[in-house]
Amino acid sequence: MAFLIRSVLTLLCALLAGASQATDAPISIRDAWIRWLPGDIPAGGYLTVVNSSDHRVSLLQASSPAYAQISLHQTRMSSGMTEMVPLTRLDIAPNSTLRFESAGYHLMLERPTRTIVPGDHVTVALRFDSGHSITVTFDVHQPSDGESSGTSMERSSTKTSPR
Ligand SMILES: [Cu+2]
């Protein structure tokens, strides 16, 4: 019986995967946004990665025509001070969702190749260890857009605050 259910599920998954081929079914990205900062200060990129496959996937690299350098970082607390640690890979467990900001993860976007201002949209390609890349559009926000509460991802993604 369990086997039969599993077979049906597998078939269903195969059908679903076939239906959404263009979007790299096992991994999807939500709520991608950039906290813009003035001048030459590096910007922070945040996103939510949904891994709906039954194996771990790892984000290895991000690149964009809009920034000469993008690195993966994690902000950590170390004896009362926050520090940023560069990461060579970022693992997303099977069937789980990783919210960058809640875990201190961010993309560090440096050396813009053009003038970028809040309201812009920036295309970033994310490369995973499975071999495929996903191209995501990040919305560029004012620095204040994410800072007033601890759940800034909530605010920054879909709602627009009145001004
Ligand atoms: Cu950083």
Image (cartoon, rainbow, N blue to C red):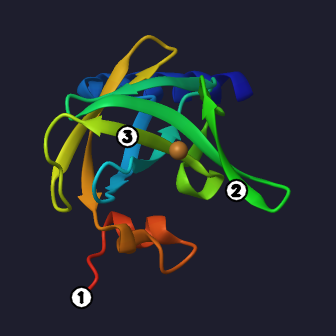
Q: Position of residue 24 (x, y in %)?
A: 35, 25
Check disc 2 and report its element: helix, strand or loop: strand
Residue at 21 percent across and 88 percent down: it is 163
Q: Which residue is mark 3?
A: 109
Q: Which residue is mark 1?
A: 162
* Position of residue 47 measured from the top left corner of the image (x, y, whole percent): 43, 48
Amino acid carrying label 3: it is: Leu
Marks 2/3: CA–CA distance: 19 Å
| The label number, if any, that marks residue 131 in the structure image | none
Residue 17 falls left or right of residue 112: right
- Tell me if 59 is positioned left or right of 6 in this view: left
Q: Name which of mark 1 and mark 2 comes first in the sequence.
A: 2
Query: Which of pointers 1 and 3 indicates the residue nearer the eye?
Result: 3
- Residue drawn where x is 57% and y is 39% of the image: 73
**Residue found at x 29% / y 34%:** 124
Visible in this render: residue 1? no
Q: Which is nearer the N-term, disc 2 or disc 3?
A: 2
The reply to whether the C-beta atoms of the residues labelled 1 and 2 are less than 8 Å apart is: no
Q: Dot 1, how many residues are within 10 Å of its Cα: few (below 14), some (14-19), or many (20+)?
A: few
Is residue 99 visible in the rendered image? The answer is yes
Q: Secondary structure at mark 3?
A: strand
The furthest residue to the top: 131
Q: Looking at numbered disc 1 in the image, what kind of residue is underneath it?
A: Pro
Extreme-right residue of the structure: 79
Marks 2 and 3 in Cβ contact (< 8 Å): no
Q: Which residue is mark 2?
A: 82
